[in-house]
């Protein structure tokens, strides 16, 4: 039974830390001492669990934001129409352009990274020196 308690405490600690709580607050919510929580964080396997949990949370957040993307674009478009005040239209236009250019930059960087990955793989596999 003691092992189950530790597993439950560790699971709650992982969840709290992954959600961004401080070590002290995550430990408190998990029913553990802060000292125990800090000791767990020295374990690479435990830290990896926290990182995996954090990545799952981030994946869910990105999925939800992606689902809202079309609505956000429509809203910006609506705000740029003549019925809105001049300042509102200007703000919507600026936001649209800013995000558009940022998106172009990110897509360009991703393409460059992929090209570099391919070059590295070819270099490793091509001549046997890498």
Image (cartoon, rainbow, N blue to C red):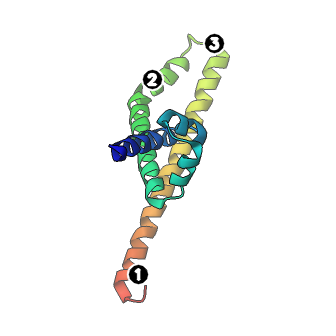
Mark 1 neighbour class, 10 Å CA radius: few under 14, some 14 to 19, many 20 or more: few
Mark 2 vs mark 3, foreground winner is 2
Instruction: Report the residue marked by disc 3.
Output: 85
Depicted 123 relative to depicted 18: above or below: below
Cα gap from disc 3 to disc 1, whole angstroms: 57 Å
Q: Which numbered circle lies on residue 69?
A: none
Instruction: Report the residue marked by disc 1.
Output: 123
- x, y percentage for residue 15? 44, 39
Q: Which numbered circle lies on residue 74?
A: 2
Q: Residue furthest front?
A: 1
- Can residue 20 be seen in the rendering of this structure? no
Depicted 45 relative to depicted 90: above or below: below
- x, y percentage for residue 68? 42, 28
Q: Nearer the viewer, residue 20 or 92?
A: 20
Mark 3 vs mark 1, foreground winner is 1
Q: Nearer the viewer, residue 84 or 32?
A: 32
Depicted 34 relative to depicted 43: above or below: above
- x, y percentage for residue 74? 45, 23
Which tag, 3 or 1, sits closer to the chain's start? 3
What residue lies at 60% left-to-right and 39% top-to-bottom?
A: 24
- Can residue 6 be seen in the rendering of this structure? yes
User: Considering the numbered disc 3 on the image, is that residue within a helix, a strand or a loop?
Assistant: loop
Q: Residue furthest top?
A: 83
What residue lies at 49% left-to-right and 59% top-to-bottom?
A: 43
Cα gap from disc 1 to disc 2, whole angstroms: 46 Å
Mark 2 neighbour class, 10 Å CA radius: few under 14, some 14 to 19, many 20 or more: few
User: Considering the numbered disc 1 on the image, is that residue within a helix, a strand or a loop?
Assistant: helix
What residue lies at 58% left-to-right and 12% top-to-bottom?
A: 84
Q: Nearer the viewer, residue 95 or 121?
A: 121
């Amino acid at each position: 039974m003691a092992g189950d308690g530790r597993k439950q405490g560790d699971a709650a600690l992982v969840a709290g830390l992954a959600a961004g709580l401080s070590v002290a607050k995550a430990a408190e919510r998990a029913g553990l001492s802060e000292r125990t929580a800090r000791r767990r964080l020295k374990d690479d396997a435990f830290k990896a669990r926290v990182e995996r949990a954090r990545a799952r949370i981030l994946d869910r957040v990105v999925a939800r934001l992606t689902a809202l993307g079309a609505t956000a674009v429509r809203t910006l478009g609506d705000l740029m129409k003549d019925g809105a005040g001049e300042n509102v239209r200007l703000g919507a236009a600026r936001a649209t352009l800013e995000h558009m250019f940022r998106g172009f930059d990110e897509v360009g960087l991703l393409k460059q990274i992929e090209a570099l990955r391919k070059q590295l793989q070819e270099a490793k596999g091509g001549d046997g020196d890498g």
